[in-house]
Image: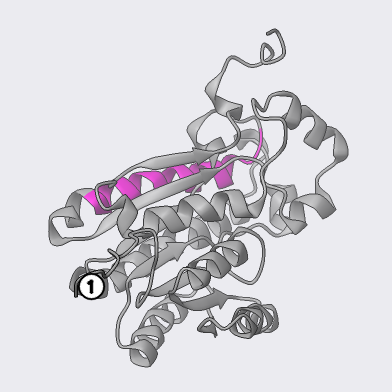
Amino acid sequence: MEGDQPRDPIMLDGKVAIVTGAAGGIGAATARLMARRGASVVIADIAGDAAQAAAQRIGEDGAAAIALPVDLADEASVVALIEETVSRFGRLDILHNNAAALTPELHAADLDIARMETWAWDRSFAVNCRGTMIAMRTALPHLVTSRGAIVNTVAAMALRGHALQAAYTASKAAVIQMTRSVAASHGRLGVRCNAVAPGLILTPVVRDHLPPEMLTMTLGETLNDRLGEPEDVAQIAAFLASDAAGHVNGQVVTVDGGYISHIPGVSGLS
């Protein structure tokens, strides 16, 4: 009709999105933002009560959200998540693979390769890599139908060497390659697959458990004058999921305030 405004491509009206690990942190921030932009959002998390609470908060803001349980280490659970979403909403447009194995026990065991415990390696890959693969494999037929998008959360650490967290960084590096592989295999079928690579983000877990000296050290090598917040990552993830990023495929976007972009130790020389 004459006078109608063109649709804003950043908006997600009518789209259905799954966000894993959405009970808190980056996932919760992304789910809230996608819901505000018009998507019906599935809060998928192994922490059922926290997921329900997150969905309820989104619902109180007038947006559509439900909580569904998922254990990324359990193939049947991942498949059920995708199938239940499509059963309830009739479609799937966005898959945001954000969840990762980040328990304090695992973090303490994920050291350098010489001290790596096999269970820590296996757990990291079972959740971060294998679970992401199963989610994408199960979702792809639906995303081909909707010409949808996948956004994988990886890590800026997966793009550089790190003295510790060898299992976590290796598993996230594998997801980077899977991201490119899906873009290559399914781009011509209408599916976009990109990744967002956060640096140190001030999630509740980081605020509660990371030593203050680590925060100070990271800030000293960050080109911005602050550390990142979950909403910083959410903005990029929601953009990559939207039609505004319609010609972006197979890319990794780093959200770290410039931390890995420069020679260490010289950020304060100017």
Q: Position of residue 21 (x, y in %)?
A: 57, 67
Q: Position of residue 5 (x, y in %)?
A: 30, 66
Residue to which mark 1 is pinned: 146
41 inside magenta stretch: no
Q: Range of the magenta residues? A: 164-183
- Residue 152's place in the image compared with 95, above or below, is above
Residue at image position (52%, 53%) is 235
Residue at image position (56%, 36%) is 157
Q: Is residue 216 visible?
A: yes
Q: Position of residue 171 (x, y in %)?
A: 49, 48
Q: Position of residue 64 (x, y in %)?
A: 50, 83
- Residue 214's place in the image compared with 189, above or below, is above
- Residue 9's place in the image compared with 4, above or below, is above
Q: Is residue 73 visible?
A: no
Hey, what amino acid is under mark 1?
Ser
Q: Is residue 180 left or right of residue 65?
A: left
Image mark count: 1
Q: Is residue 16 left or right of residue 190?
A: right
